[in-house]
Amino acid sequence: MRKHIILFGPPGSGKGTQAKKLEAKYGIIQISTGDLFRYEMSHDTQLGLKAKAYMAKGELVPDEVVIGMLKNKVDASPEAKGFIFDGFPRTIPQAEALDQLLEAKNEKIGRLIALTVSDGELINRLLERGKTSGRTDDSNEEIIQNRIDVYKKETSPVYGFYDAKGKSSSVNGVGTIDEIFNRLCEEIDSI
Ligand code: B4P
């Protein structure tokens, strides 16, 4: 059975940072919807143009756009040992679509692991990254605050969606990158 993990948490909680390390250790493929959109935007594709206006304001890209892109990415790697979903699902309809997609392959999510970090720490991390990343959504505190608000309203219910299936757990997302990585590995090894 392939191992599929959702790495969950607010913007700046370290999902992307940790997903890359987990990919290297477990040989399962990271799918970051944020990275996919940034790639599309940098190549001025239709998909990138659709996403740009939403991302610049710190809003979510519409579900139908994200879900179609995610399906293509999963279907493109049938040989993968599993996936780390990083930044997806961010709404309940996205979670339902992900479960249906996996069910059609007789597969399911093994675990959702949430990284918990205080709002103040999130804002500091993202403003720091904004100094060098060139990401417009990181350089303005109001936009960062909007991303955190959108997370609380639209994304945080996804934790409960998987918790009802006994699949959600939380890990302290504050500490060194290696400390947090070790906490995540303990969770994954217990699946
Ligand atoms: P994402 O690309 O998913 O970005 P993120 O939430 O900002 O980042 P992440 O939590 O991965 O943080 P990171 O490791 O980089 O989303 C961007 C936008 O894309 C969204 O706002 C939305 O518009 C759109 N989008 C994406 N997916 C979507 C979906 N499914 N539906 C709709 N819209 C979608 O870490 C952040 C910073 O912290 C880095 O600088 C890092 O170096 C630092 N850091 C990491 N760990 C640290 C630690 N332990 N201590 C100190 N600093 C740390």
Image: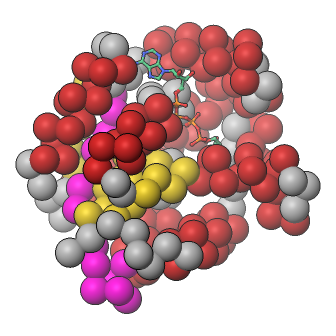
Towards the viewer: 162 or 39:
39
Query: Which residue is located at x 37 percent, y 78 percent?
Result: 102
> Is 150 one of the magenta-colored residues?
no
- Residue 132 locus on image (x, y percent): 73, 16
Query: Which residue is located at x 12 percent, y 55 percent?
Result: 191
Left or right: 152 in relation to 160? right
- Residue 83 locus on image (x, y percent): 39, 61
Q: Dividing the image into 4 quarters, which one contains the N terminus?
A: bottom left
Ligand 1, by image quadrant, is top right
As drawn, the residue found furthest toward the right would be 44
- The colour mode here is secondary structure
Q: Which contiguous range is marked in magenta?
A: 102-116
User: Would you identify the image quadrant in which residue 46 lies?
Assistant: bottom right
Query: Which residue is located at x 26 percent, y 70 percent?
Result: 2
Left or right: 184 in relation to 156? left
Q: Is residue 93 visible?
A: no
> Is 115 one of the magenta-colored residues?
yes
Query: Which residue is located at x 68 percent, y 62 percent?
Result: 62
- Count of number-bearing discs: 0
User: Would you identify the image quadrant in which residue 111 lies?
Assistant: bottom left
Towards the viewer: 14 or 64:
14
Left or right: 130 in relation to 160? right
Q: Is residue 153 visible?
A: yes
- Residue 110 locus on image (x, y percent): 22, 62
- Residue 167 locus on image (x, y percent): 19, 57
Towards the viewer: 92 or 67:
67
